[in-house]
Every structure is written in structure tokens, then in C-alpha cells.
């Protein structure tokens, strides 16, 4: 579904991505790991077309997006749903209005159709009947689920999760992880890309894991490939130790 071909990205004198070859399969959960500063967010921005490579190509769903103009990128981004770290709900809008927002912006659906679709995805994330509530009445976990409903409402081909469990307590984190897996099962064509530091999530929910280091893929494969890896960088990262070959800036 997503293919980075020798992608290099340079900001000034800093090479964030270094001839990166990255392959994300369709209809799977891929978790992208790496310590801070290793290019995870820059990678996501390339997938969204918010950044262009210094050199190399990004091919998504068969299209080389590298040379897309702004109009083509606007159409292209309709393929995506996005769950942000803090859910990013509009406090002045009800839950239903928040969830319907992408439909208002990008479709010509009638109000009743939008309301029905909003209720459908709210049920999918376990929150039926709350369309008339407002974000300030919701718990942290509920806000995350509403954010996920909004990301799913326009039936995207790809959903991006940006550090979905950062700052969450263990119970909420486990709930979000379970929800990511459940959404993936319910939507077998959906490609999920999760940016995370959460190693437990990497082993529990991902079909495919990728670790970035020094702007390249250090290891890509199944959770078992990571569990069984003898690579000293992988072992150091999973052990959470300062001592080892991995450099800290």
C-alpha cells in the first residue's frame, strides 16, 4: 500500500531520512518504532504529502505522490483518516458534529445520511447514543474513541495513528490497543499505520513492525522477528538501556 523508494530528506545540514526503503502492506497493522528524532513524524508527513523527499519516491496505493500538485494532494488525502495524540476534537461542537466534520468538508451527503453514518461509527468504537454530548463531558478514553470515529467516518483506505497511547494510563492504553485491532478486523481492507514508542503495543497488536534508526530501517518484520532479533540496536531499544551501540543526541 505504501512504498518508500530510496527516500532521503535533508533539513539544512541534517539528514533525517537516508535513502529509506520502507514497505507497508495493505490491510495490515504496521507499527513504526524508533527513539525520538529518528524520523517517525517526518515519515508520516511524507505519507500524507505534507513533505516532499529531497530525493527518492513515495508510492501510495499505486500512485507516485512525489510530484502531485496541491489540488492532486487535496484529493489524495481523502484516502486517509488520522487519530491525533490528543484526539483534537472541537470543543464547541457536539460529538456528532465532530464526527460528521469530514463528511461536511469533503462530501455532499445530506444531513440525515451524515447523522446515520456518525452513529454507525460511534457504535463501532463502542459509544452509541452520545451524538449530542460535548467533548468536555467525556473521559480521556472516550475522547480518543470519538477521534477514532471521526477518522473512520469517511471510510478511508489508510488510517494513521500518531502516538495513540502517549500519556494514557495503562487501562486506557490497553483499551486503545484493543480498539485498533478490532477496527482492523472489522475493516479488512483498511491499512493501519501506528507511530509509537509503546513496545508492548508493538508486540501485541501489530502484524508488521518497522524500527527506524539513523534514517533507515533497522529491522522490519513480524513481532516475533523483533522478539528473536540478535541485532544489538534492537536489543538495546527493547531493553530500554542507555548503554549500547544506539546513539543518543
Image (cartoon, helix red, strand yellow):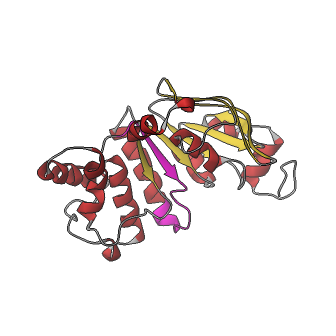
Image x and y of residue 159, in percent: 44, 43
Q: Going 78% across and 49% down the picture, which residue do you hit?
A: 12
- Residue 188 seen in render: yes
Q: Which residues are magenta?
A: 156-173
Q: Going 60% across and 55% down the picture, which residue do you hit?
A: 198
Q: Going 34% across and 72% down the picture, which residue do you hit?
A: 91
Which one is in front, 207 or 192? 192
Judged left or right of residue 76, residue 243 is right
Find the residue positioned furthest to the left: 112
Find the residue positioned furthest to the bottom: 137
Q: Is residue 163 above or below residue 225?
A: below
Judged left or right of residue 84, residue 243 is right
Image x and y of residue 155, in percent: 31, 40
Which one is in front, 228 or 241? 241
Q: Is residue 128 above or below residue 114?
A: below
Q: Is residue 174 above or below residue 110?
A: below
Amino acid at each position: 500500500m505504501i512504498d518508500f523508494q530510496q527516500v532521503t530528506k535533508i533539513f539544512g545540514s541534517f539528514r533525517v531520512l537516508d535513502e529509506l526503503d520502507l514497505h507497508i502492506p495493505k490491510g495490515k497493522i504496521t507499527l513504526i518504532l524508533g527513539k525520538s528524532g529518528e524520523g517517525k513524524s517526518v515519515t508520516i508527513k511524507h505519507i500524507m504529502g505534507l513533505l516532499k523527499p529531497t530525493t527518492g519516491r513515495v508510492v501510495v496505493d499505486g500512485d507516485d505522490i512525489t510530484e502531485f500538485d496541491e489540488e492532486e494532494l487535496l484529493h489524495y488525502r481523502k484516502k486517509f483518516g488520522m487519530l491525533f495524540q490528543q484526539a483534537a476534537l472541537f470543543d464547541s461542537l457536539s460529538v456528532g458534529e465532530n464526527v460528521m466534520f469530514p463528511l461536511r468538508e469533503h462530501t455532499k451527503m445530506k444531513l440525515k445520511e451524515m447523522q446515520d453514518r456518525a452513529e454507525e461509527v460511534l457504535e463501532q468504537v463502542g459509544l452509541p447514543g452520545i451524538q449530542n454530548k460535548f467533548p468536555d463531558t467525556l473521559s480521556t478514553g472516550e475522547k480518543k474513541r470519538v477521534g477514532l470515529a471521526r477518522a473512520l467516518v469517511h471510510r478511508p483506505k489508510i488510517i494513521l495513528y500518531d502516538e495513540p497511547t502517549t500519556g494514557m494510563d495503562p487501562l486506557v492504553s490497553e483499551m486503545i490497543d484493543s480498539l485498533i485491532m478490532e477496527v482492523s478486523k472489522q475493516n479488512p481492507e483498511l491499512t493501519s499505520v501506528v507511530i509509537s514508542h509503546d513496545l508492548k503495543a508493538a508486540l501485541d497488536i501489530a502484524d508488521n513492525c518497522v524500527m527506524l534508526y539513523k534514517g533507515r530501517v533497522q529491522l522490519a518484520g513480524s513481532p516475533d522477528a523483533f522478539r528473536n532479533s540478535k541485532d544489538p540496536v534492537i536489543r538495546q531499544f527493547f531493553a530500554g538501556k542507555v548503554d549500547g551501540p544506539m546513539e543518543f543526541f
